[in-house]
Image (cartoon, rainbow, N blue to C red):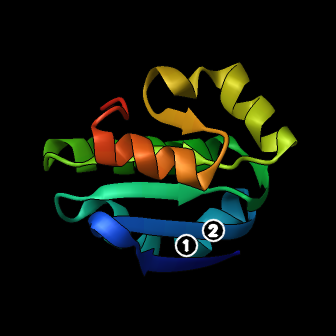
Amino acid sequence: MKIAVNQLADDIVHIAPSGRMDALGVEDISIPFTAAAATRKALVVVDLAQVDFLASVGLRLFFSSARALQQRGGRMALAAAQPDVGAVLDATGVAQLISIYPSLDEACAALRGGAANPI
């Protein structure tokens, strides 16, 4: 599993993991993901377009980072999930805690406008 972190307009942190978010994959990215998502007040969008599998360990990474981010006054949104990953997000009720958007543009617009739900 790989991860790319970029700064977008309006100080949005764009985190783009790619690969399988299973135990081995999350182990590979947990430190850089947490460093990018949870160490300061920020608007963070997690672009799931290149994630083809999401296990419970990946959900825990999202929840713990979103919680730490919220404690610092920031917000997180998930975006562009592939159908199988989207089905996991729907089945587990993630949207009750972290806002999910069908596209990166919609997620960024929601973060800029303050619409993304805090955890």
In the image shown, does 112 or 49 lie closer to the viewer? 112
Dot 2, how many residues are within 10 Å of its Cα: few (below 14), some (14-19), or many (20+)?
A: many
Q: Position of residue 94 (x, y in %)?
A: 55, 28
Q: Which mark is residue 52?
A: none
Is the residue 93 above or below the residue 117 in the image?
above
Percent of width and height locating residue 41: 17, 58
Residue 32 quadrant: bottom left
**What element does badge 1 sit on?**
helix
User: Of residues 30 and 39, which is closer to you in this image?
Assistant: 39
Quadrant of the drawing holding the C terminus: top left
Left or right placement of residue 14 versus residue 49 in this view: left
Mark 1–mark 2 Cα distance, whole angstroms, equals 8 Å
The residue at which mark 1 appears reads as 29
Residue at 85% across, 40% down: 83
Badges 1 and 2: C-beta atoms under 8 Å apart?
A: yes
Q: Residue at x 14, y 46 (%)?
A: 73
Tell me which residue sits at (81%, 48%) in the image: 82
Which amino acid type is marked by label 2? Pro
- Which element type, helix, strand or loop, lies under badge 2? strand
Q: Pick whichever, 14 or 54, lies toward us.
A: 14
Q: Quadrant of residue 10?
A: bottom left
Q: Which residue is mark 2?
A: 17
Q: Which comes sooner in the sequence, label 1 or label 2?
A: 2
Residue 59 locus on image (x, y percent): 57, 42
**Closer to the observer: label 1 or label 2?**
2
